[in-house]
Amino acid sequence: MLDASLARRLGAALYDGLLVLALMFLVTLPFIAIRDGEPVEPGQGPYRIALFVTAYFFFVGFWSRYGRTLGMQSWGLQLETAKGEKPDIARSSLRFFAAVLSLIPLGLGFWWQLWDKDGQTWHDRISGTRLRFYPKSGAEL
């Protein structure tokens, strides 16, 4: 077990981002149907909230149930508490909102891992979680 590298984190984030984007397309369909096929205005409050809630349930649901998302599983990553357990819903929610804050200043909270003495991001520290890499036997690090 090793701490997850920034490259692995970004790989998993790209994979999960594509999955969340696909879910957001599905969530957009009812908004288009309500408008009789007219394009959805991106600035609409209810639409923005629906997209945000979709991302929230995707990440918090996977983290609290399995300790990993599908992207994290593909990259051999596991989210753990300081005790090595999967996070509960409250801790996963805190991590989600802290990750949003980490993205706001041009992703500085993610890049912070490069300077952190323990290799943690802002949302790792705020939520009391850690992202671990579990290599498959014989796999490259």
Image (cartoon, rainbow, N blue to C red):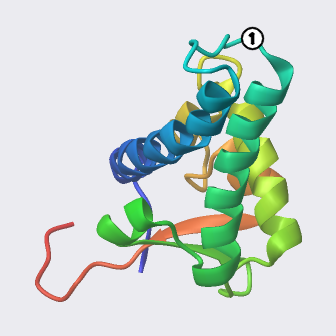
State whether residue 124 is above or below residue 17.
below
| Residue 85, image x, y percentages | 68, 87
* Quadrant occupied by the N terminus: bottom left
Residue extending furthest front?
36
Q: Extreme right residue here?
A: 90
- Give me the residue at 61% from left, 42% from top: 27
Give the image quarter of residue 99: top right
Residue at x 32%, y 64% (from the top left corner):
75
Q: Which residue is mark 1?
A: 43
Residue 56 picture location, percent across and down? 72, 51
* Residue 6 visible in this rendered orientation of the protein: yes
Residue 115, visible in the rendered structure: no
Residue appearing at x 55%, y 52% in the figure: 119
The relative height of residue 77 versus residue 84 in the rendered view (above or below) is above
Q: Position of residue 68 (x, y in %)?
A: 53, 72
Q: How many labels, in total?
A: 1
Q: Residues within 10 Å of mark 1 (few under 14, many from 20)?
A: few
Camera-nearest residue between 118 and 86: 86
Q: Secondary structure at mark 1?
A: loop
Q: Where does the C terminus fall, quadrant-wise?
A: bottom left
Q: Quadrant of residue 57?
A: bottom right
Q: Is residue 90 left or right of residue 123?
A: right
